[in-house]
Amino acid sequence: EWTTEMQADYERILTVGEECISAEELKGLITAKGRGSDHQGFNLYDGFEPSGRMHIAQGVFKAMNVNKCTFPGTNSTFVFWVADWFALMNDKMGGDLEKIKIVGQYLIEVWKAAGMDLSNVVFKWASEEITQNAHIYWPTMLDVARRFNITRIKKCCQIMGRMEGSLTSAQVLYPLMQCTDVFFLKADICQLGVDQRKVNMLAREYCDAAKIKRKPIILSHHMLYGLKAGQEKMSKSDPDSAVFMEDTAEDVDRKIMAAYCPSKEEVSESARPSQSDDAGRESMHLKEDTLKNPCLDYIENIILSPPGATFTAGSATYTDFVSIRSAFLEGDISETELKRGLIAELNKLLNPVRTHFTENDVARELLEQVRQFKREAAATTSTSEIRRLNLVSLGKIPSQSHVVFAPAPSVKPTLQEALNTLDQLRSTDGDKAIVLFLSDWTAKVCNSCDAEDKAIDAYFTVLLSSLRALDPELMEKVSIIKQSEAILADPSNYWISVINVGRHFTLDDVMGPNMKDSDGVGNVIGRLMLIGDIMGLEPASIALPARDPDSDLLSDLIGRFYDEKLSSMTKASTTIIDSPSLALQEARESEAHKTENDEYFLLDDPKVHGKSKMKKAFCEPGNIEFCPPIVVSFAFSGGEIKVSRSEENGGDITYTNQTDVENDFKSGALHPGDLKAAASSIMTGTLTKISDALKKDPNATKGAKALKAQEKKMAKKKKK
């Protein structure tokens, strides 16, 4: 039953937002989890980075809004996401997490002094929560990323205030992480500023994509203007753009008296159509305001926010904002009177904070520590410590190894993928340790196998079993490292390294010529992760497949990052390895004519396919430019091909090099039928080796079945 108290909760919470998406859903939430329900309550969330300063919007304005949302009896909890991990990543307080935590405690003390009721407020520290729950947080982020294209994420970049054309690749990662926060914190209401609206809407879109029934409600509060002309919001980097919580009475007087305070409406240049599609240029206000007077903005949203509040200017006292605005525009209130009244009210709000930090011992000590940290930071230069995963020091791999990255998983593992991998593993010289890296989390974010963990693992199981069957001696020397397990050994440093890679390269750098805005943003994340993986592996050499059209780009990015950011590390040599093509037919323009039976060999092909597929293989007499039986035979024959034929056809012959075969085939001395018979024998033997290995390995047998099941599932989904 909807009660008058519930209606009061509903109306009070609505006053916090300039927009609520949606009010009807808010009613439903209050009914299900609010006052009088059997539920433990609903959660609202906002986040802040402990950077050392708090402006009045984050301090007093936020305290007022939190109190409205957590009014006694509402059955709600306000969760603050203390982004100390991001402050660490941004090298705040010299990258000292303990100092950052002290700054966080100081900011909490400011809120307490500003009147925030902390009885229904919870502070969650990102450094602790993300690290302790990395196995939950990061896979969720990867799942969010895989469901959106680059175009959609670019639209969220207003939260960094950046123009779309000048984005670093890390700036597409931040909205994905913020979206993840919503679900990680189990937030029912996202109570952030209007500037965060687009990323909060992303969370609602994710619910549609991931089939999550209850979407988070978006309650976006107003963004206060900066005190200078043209400032859409306050800026911590500009001390005169806002009143800050630590400002003295003299500071407040100086800033407000100098503040922009127009009494005539103006047309904003930011409304020009040519700029409207750039997220970084869009207004941070939902309501049209052609005056944009920060002094009036403070009066409306801070001074008059508490119930029953009044404002005095000159000799007149006002109880509503409309009257104040009209009186000012009509000249009944002068600019000086308006500003003097605002200064008096702001100091009333800030005086309890000043008193608290003067008289309370704990608060006073926190303030002095924060001031000391700032002095130390100003006196020292930033260190160039490289934050990264270090698998060598963790004892996971030997130092200076040769690294190969397994192919991106698919539901149809091919013999070509196995050959490419073996050739890359063999490409090392000397006594280097060899590492085969299974990028399972990259596969997830890039939507391989529809991001099904079971299918991704199944692919790697089938691949490894096949590699061991094809070259057991080589594989004895190879260490297998699974990406997710490696990352979880030190998730904090790994993801800091990935983000730092993203900060270094522009989005265009990482996308390269082949990636389009319509492609999944997970592909960008996957490329950043590759360089993060390499930093963690610290290899002597890396092999990449020539058959991957992006290998040249990746090699260039790896080399550039070593040269420009990793000068203290030994640079890995990167080689692009070209393996023979195992294609059985010439490339066809139409996908409709392609079938697995005549195009290529699969790792789970039965041995009879060695003959049946080779029988259908392209083999034009005399054509050595494209002759699959020759290429495939030498790839798996061990360097020797035995051709059996009758005496009248030249008798049996053994070839020990590919050139001799090609010469005889070109001249007609070797008949296509005889060549195919030899190739069929080789491939039947090859597929028998793999088939026997898969049957002997229970996990590989299960894996092959899991891939077949996933293939059917994906085909069914595609038809819908």
Image (cartoon, grey):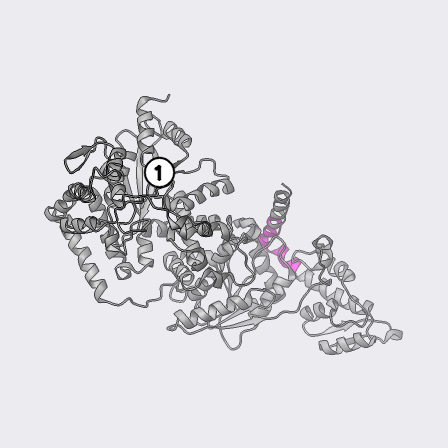
Count numbered badges in the picture.
Answer: 1
Judged from this view, the residue extending furthest toward the right is: 648
Residue 615, horizontal then vertical, whole percent: 78, 61
Residue 444, horizontal then vertical, whole percent: 51, 52
Q: Which residue is located at x 61 percent, y 46 percent?
A: 714
Residue 191, horizontal then vertical, whole percent: 34, 40
* Image quarter in which the N terminus is found: top left
- Please give the residue where the numbered disc 1 appears in the rendered image: 18
Nearest the viewer among 63 and 693 is 63
Nearest the viewer among 244 and 440 is 244
* Image quarter in which the C terminus is found: top right
Would you say the magenta stretch is mainly helix, strand or loop? helix
Instruction: Name the image quarter holding residue 381.
Output: bottom left
Q: Is residue 624 left or right of residue 486?
A: right
Location of residue 569 with respect to 586 vertically, above or below: below
Residue 184, horizontal then vertical, whole percent: 39, 44
Nearest the viewer among 233 and 193 is 233
> Which amino acid type is shown beneath numbered disc 1?
Glu
> What residue range appears in magenta?
690-706
Location of residue 658 with respect to 353 vertically, above or below: below
Secondary structure under tag 1 reads: loop
Q: Is residue 333 left or right of residue 619?
A: left
